[in-house]
Amino acid sequence: MYLKKNYNKETGRIYLSIAQKYRHPVKKVSTDRNVKSLGYLDELEKKYKDPIAHFRKVAKKMTEEDNAKKKITLKINMDEELAGDSKGRKNLGYAAILKIYHELELNDFFNNRARNKSFKYNTNSIMILLAVSRLLSPGSKKKAFLEKSRYFERFSFTLVDIYRALSHFAGLTKEFQEYLNLKVKEKYGRDTKTIYYDVTNFYFEIDKADNLRKYGKSKECRHNPIVQMGLAMDSGGIPIHYKLFPGNKLDKETFRTVIGEVRRKYSTGRIIVVADMGIITGDNIYYLTGGKNRNGYVFSFSVKGGTDAFKEYVLDDTGYVGSDGRPAGEDDSFKIKSRRIARDINVSMKSGRTAKKTVYEKQVIFWSKKYVDKARAERGELVKKAMELVEDPVKYNRATTYGAAKYVKNVQYDKKTGEILKSGKSPRFDYDRLAEDEKYDGYYAIVTSELKMTDGEIIDAYRGLWEIEETFKVTKGTIEARPVYVSRQDRIGAHFLTCFISLVIIRLIGKKTGRKYSPEKIIECLNSISCSNEQDNLYLFDYRSRVSDAIGKALGIDFTKKRLRQGEIKNILAESKK
């Protein structure tokens, strides 16, 4: 610390203060900060013989006292034992989650919605625990409650309070999503010109279906009741809106409900929706582009499921160019072509009848040697199993031959048991079916209403769909949205609301760190920013990495210190909540 003199040009007076050189831990820039204001020199001369000499000594003494505080002598007893049931490890990485949570002002939302309720517990505090636990230690609500001491928060509620709060949260789902979208747009910006849409489902290990959990086509090929989730995401990879559907709802039937809510509630303007082939129907296309609607689409299109004329166009080498723009040859590992066409689609009318409507679209076809190799590697296991089935059909049944049976002729199953029935004809490998499938390996088709987009722009837009696929992987894997440990429909809804909040937060941390690190890497890092109580109110940290430095710099949190006092930790958390 030093004595600082500020000269006022207008009055000619000198103002004294004690200042300190300060280097920002995140921005890494040096500056001065005022520690103590003293007053004008001419006034101080009335009290002190030599104010400058006097306060230089004061500044020096303050520096010595400050340095002394930074030095602690630890006395260690090597025979000291841990107390019984010691769980001294605490996490500080969750400060990053709190930072985004409070930047989005989610605390205001949950506190305000509980203001006129007779709750004896803090619903915002409960949501913080659920969101933090969902990211850093996913599991049941009971697990989150039992691990609450892992954090430096005062969670003053019971496990029963958590379950009661779930019903309250479930009733806020629609309102919350609109609020969250507004805050994301306000705080971080949101581009909704292109919207990605996909559907996944979550299985429940129960024997009997109900109004929500119904039997349907499970993405994991499990014979359990499922719940469908439709999710819309912006072009930056940040989730916009989700909706739950009964498990027997088809993917294509969820599209208009979710996209309709996004268009009505979020003031998106004209949008281009990007989705996979499971969504492409005449009704969905017409919903976007027909009548007064002038929205657009970029959909993947099934080559094998196309008309004979379309397949002929795909397999015809005429018009394909390589990555260098020249006519494609046999040695090219990539080729592409496109055309504009008028195509008839079937649309369901309000009267119940089906009408043909014409859409004008661009079709982009591309082929990649890399995708050929990938398709054949993935099919290899099915072909192997199919050949084993031919050799020894007694070893297999309908469940164990899933996918492979399409390459085997003369196979019949018992309708009740699923066992393979003995018949007069022996199972035979279907080489013709295999050859037909292999013809289309490596080919991908995309159809779009955007006639002016270049082929490259269309492919880039479609490739963005991997973000939503990765989001579902994060939801099911990293934050373990399944298995779901609650059974009531309202609590199931609250569970997925918590997962949605956690998803948005981890995606925003990724955005603020330049999208350099995967959600898994960020979560692993935040979990590692932990400490142990070394002595009294002193905590020892043992983790620092490029990822933690990047997160700290992006969010303005100093994760670099090896030791922190409890008071300093509380200050970090308090700053994260501003």
Image (spheres, rainbow, N blue to C red):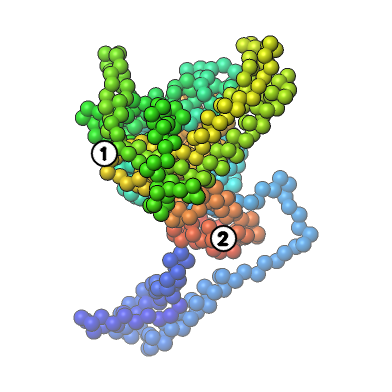
**Relative vertical location of residue 14 with respect to residue 474 in this rendering, above or below:** below
Q: Looking at the image, is mark 2 or mark 1 earlier in the sequence?
A: 1
Question: Farthest residue in the right direction?
Answer: 79
**Relative vertical location of residue 178 with respect to residue 83 in this rendering, above or below:** above
The amino acid type of the residue labelled 2 equals: Ser
Task: Measure the alpha-carbon separation of dots 2 and 1.
Answer: 43 Å
Q: Between residues 472 and 459, which one lies in front from this camera angle?
A: 459
Disc ID at residue 270: 1
Relative horizontal placement of residue 142, taking residue 131 as reference (left or right): right
Q: For numbered disc 1, what is the local secondary structure?
A: loop
Q: Which residue is mark 2?
A: 545
Q: Residue at x 42, y 73 (%)?
A: 30
Q: Residue at x 54, y 74 (%)?
A: 67
Q: Residue at x 20, y 81 (%)?
A: 10
Tell me the quarter of the picture where residue 483 sits: top right
Q: Find residue 312 and report its horizontal and vertical position in percent.
A: 41, 32
Residue 37 in view of the camera: yes
Circle 2 residues within 10 Å: few <14, some 14–19, many ≥20: few
Q: For numbered disc 2, what is the local secondary structure?
A: loop
**Quadrant of the image containing the N terminus:** bottom left
Q: Find residue 47 and report its horizontal and vertical position in percent.
A: 35, 83
Circle 1 residues within 10 Å: few <14, some 14–19, many ≥20: some
Q: Find residue 426 and report its horizontal and vertical position in percent.
A: 69, 17
Tell me the quarter of the picture where residue 377 sits: top right
